[in-house]
Amino acid sequence: MRALLVAAALAAAQAPPAEVKVVEYLKANVRPGERVVVSQLVNQVFTSPEERAALNRLFGAFFKLPLFLAQHQQTLGRPPTLKEISEQFHFQVPGEAELLLKIMESDPRMPRFIKRNHVNGEIQIVDVERVLADPRFAKPLERTIAGWEGRPEPAFTVTGYDGKPLASADLAGKPHLLYFWFTGCPPCLRTSPLLAELDRTYAARGFRIVGLNADRVLELPYGDEERKAYAREHGLTFTLAQLDPQTLEAYGSVSVFPTLFFVDAKGIVVKQLVGQQDKAALEAAFRLALE
C-alpha cells in the first residue's frame, strides 16, 4: 500500500499543475445523472490558458474513450485496465482515468456500454454492440474493428522528422510496416526496440519500417527535439514521420497504440497487430509481408 501511495504522489508531482486543478475540481463536482458542461467550466471556473487547455484535452479524450474501449475489447479480447487507459491517453493525475469513466457513466448522452467493479473501479465488461448502435461511434468503430488484412493499403502523405514529405507511393513495390505510436506510450516503448532490432535484420531484404508518431494528433506535450532525442536514445534508425489527422482517419481512426500494419510488395495489408508485441509475433509478421 505504501508503494502505491508513493507512486501516486510521484505521478501527481510530475503532472502539470493546471491538469491537477481540473481533475481535482471535477472529482469533487461530478454528479450522477448530470453531464459536465465544458462551456460553463470555461466561463466560470477555469480562466487561465493552461487550465482551459488541460480541460479541452481531457474532454477530447472523453469522446475518444468509447472507441478505445470498444477497439481494445474487440482486438485483445478483454477490457483495458485503468492503468492501460492512463497510458493510452497520457493521464498523469492519479485517478484521472477513473474520473473519465465516472463522467461517462453520469452523462445521459453516452451509451451505457460498460460494467465496472464497484470495489476497484476496473472495467469488467465492454458491450461493443451497444457502442456500435450509437450513430456517433458506429462508423469510425466499424472501420477500426473490421480488420484490414487482405485489403489494399490506403494512400497517405505525411511529413518526416527531417521535414521531407513521405507518401505511400514512395513505398510502392516494397514490403513495409506502418507503425502507429506516440512518444509517451509505455507499450510502444517496449515494442520500439524490438522493431529497431528487426529493422537491422530485414532492411537488407528490402523491408522498410515507417514509424508514424501520433504526438501531434493526440495533442501531447512533446516537441520535435524531444521526439528526435527519444529516437536517438532508443536506437530508432528506421523512417520516422508525423502522423496527421487525414492518415489517422484513413486507417480507421486508430485508437489503441501501438497499432501495426504490415504491407506486402503488392500494397496489401497482410497483418494487423494491436497493442504491445513480442519479438516472435513481430518477426512472423515481417516474414509474412516478405512472402
Image (cartoon, helix red, strand yellow):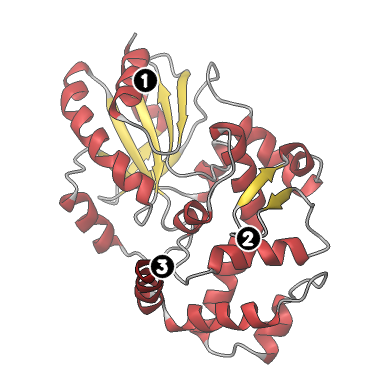
Vertical order, 226 against 192 (above or below): below
Q: Position of residue 128 (x, y in %)?
A: 71, 39
Distance between mark 2 and mark 1 Cα atoms: 40 Å
Asked which secondary structure carries label 3, the reply is loop
Q: Are marks 2 and 1 in contact (CB under 8 Å)?
A: no
Q: In the image, what residue occupies the spot 32% across and 31% down?
A: 278
Residue at the spot of label 2: 119
Q: What's under tag 3, amino acid-wise?
A: Met
Q: Residue furthest top?
A: 291
Residue at the spot of label 3: 1
Which image quarter holds the N terminus?
A: bottom left
Q: With 103 as the anchor, is 179 left or right in this view?
A: left
Distance between mark 3 and mark 1 Cα atoms: 41 Å
- How many marks on residues? 3
Q: What's under tag 1, amino acid-wise?
A: Ala
Asked which secondary structure carries label 2, the reply is loop
Distance between mark 3 and mark 2 Cα atoms: 16 Å
Q: Position of residue 210 (x, y in %)?
A: 33, 36
